[in-house]
Structure formats: C-alpha cells, structure tokens
Amino acid sequence: MPIFVLGILLGALSGGGTFHYTGDPQLSEAAGLIAAVATWLGLATILFFRPDD
C-alpha cells in the first residue's frame, strides 16, 4: 500500500508541476501517469530483485 500511495503522490506532483509550467492538461496527465507507473515499476523491481542477505 505505501508504494501505491507514493506512486500516486509523485504522479500528482509531476502532473501538477507540468500543468503549472505548460498549461496543457493532456501533457500534464501523461506526465503524471508516467511518473506514477515508473515509481511503481521501479520500486517493485527493487523489491523483487533485491539481494538476499
């Protein structure tokens, strides 16, 4: 659940920042979705492929 929330927060931050600077709602939506998915996939990859201690 924390990874999901982190992805939503980073996606919202990225989309909001993009909308603030460009004023384009479609571009900001795409940037937000890409940031959220990249966060989820990146953290899932780190958790999945972490070395065993």
Image (cartoon, rainbow, N blue to C red):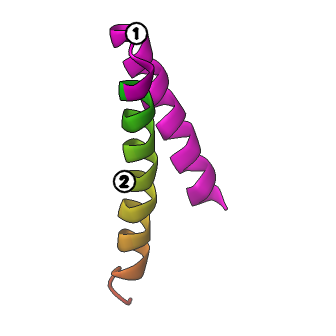
- Vertically, is 51 above or below 1? below
Q: Determine whether 13 is above or below 30 in the image.
A: above
Please name the predominant secondary structure of the magenta segment in the image.
helix
Q: Residue at x 49, y 21 (%)?
A: 16
Residue 10 included in the magenta stretch of the image: yes
Quarter holding residue 50: bottom left
| Residue 20, horizontal then vertical, whole percent | 43, 10
Identify the mark at residue 52; answer none if there is no mark: none
- Image quarter where the N terminus lies is bottom right
Question: Which structural element holds mark 2?
Answer: helix
* Residue occupying the point 40% across, 9% down: 23
Left or right of 43? Residue 51 is left
Identified at 35% across, 27% down, the residue is 27
Q: Earlier in the sequence, mark 2 or mark 1?
A: 1
- What amino acid is found at the position of numbered circle 2 in the picture? Ala
- Amino acid on which disc 1 is placed: Gly
Magenta-colored span = 1-26
Q: Secondary structure at mark 1?
A: loop
User: In the rendered image, which residue does mark 1 sit on?
Assistant: 23
In this view, the residue in front, 21 or 46, is: 21
Q: CA distance from mark 2 to mark 1?
A: 23 Å
Where residue 48 sits in the image (x, y, percent)?
Answer: 40, 80
For the C terminus, the image quarter is bottom left
Q: Residues within 10 Å of mark 2 (few under 14, many from 20)?
A: some
Q: Nearer the viewer, mark 2 or mark 1?
A: 1
Q: Residue furthest right?
A: 1
Residue carrying label 2: 38
